[in-house]
Amino acid sequence: MRIRLLSAAALLSLAVAPAFAEPVTYKLDPSHTNVLAQWSHFGYSHPFAHFGDVEGTLVYDADNVAGSSVEVTLPLSGLNGFSEKFNEHLRSADFFDAAKYPTATFKSTKVDDLGGNKLRVAGDLTIKGITKPVVLRVVLNKAEEHPMSKAPAIGFDATAKIKRSDFGVGAYAPNVSDEVTVRITTEAVAPKTR
């Protein structure tokens, strides 16, 4: 009798034990996502350019962060250097040649959990048809139900350094710095679960 009670208790504990959460697929919210590039202009200033309405998906697995991934498309038609004349120059063949290459893309290849809500995301960045590896240093800001939409939401900040010349966008280097700092902040939302 005692063995049956212990067996029943063991089965009951398995039934009520928390299951591992499934990975969640989120869609980037372009209204709350900014991808900014910053560089040195002859040492006088450090201008920014904004990459417009970014599109993409993010899969986050809280139980196995290494199983997470991200894919992003940056529409270069929305590239904004905060001056119409400069916008035209950035989109020209001197730089991004947006008419010929209308998008840039990033696709992760590896995600490492560094602890303390910090991640290292390696991936392939493609600009002007040239693909090179890039590493993002990422901070997970929050992952919980969004108070407005009542849907699962997640937010990250990230930084990376890239060389413009690696992607055929190296005009005027070294006076205009070849190294560019990329800063990203993003919110992403999953479909409602209820």
Image (spheres, rainbow, N blue to C red):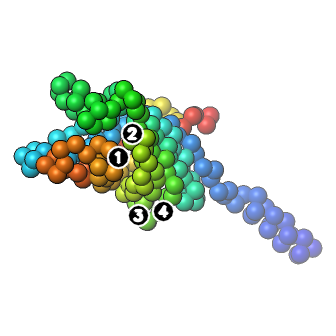
State the CA–CA distance, disc 2 to disc 1.
7 Å
Q: Position of residue 6 (x, y in %)?
A: 83, 72
Tell which circle, 3 or 2, labels the residue nearer the N-terminal end. 3
Element marked by disc 3? loop
Q: Amino acid at mark 3?
A: Gly
The dot on residue 183 is none
Q: Amino acid at mark 1?
A: Phe
Q: Quadrant of the C terminus?
A: top right
Tell which circle, 2 or 1, labels the residue nearer the N-terminal end. 2
In the image, taking residue 3 as reference, residue 113 lies left or right, namely left
Mark 1 highlights which residue?
167
State the CA–CA distance, disc 1 to disc 4.
25 Å
How crowded is the residue under tag 4: few (<14 C-alpha within 10 Å), some, or many (20+)?
some
Q: Give the mark toward the camera: 4 or 3.
A: 4
The residue positioned 55% from the left and 47% from the top of the image is 59
Q: Position of residue 177 (x, y in %)?
A: 18, 50
Mark 4 highlights which residue?
112
**In front: 95, or 179?**
95
Asked if labels 1 and 2 touch by Cβ distance under 8 angstroms, the answer is: yes
State the CA–CA distance, disc 3 to disc 2.
36 Å
Tell which circle, 2 or 4, labels the residue nearer the N-terminal end. 4
State the CA–CA distance, disc 2 to disc 4.
28 Å
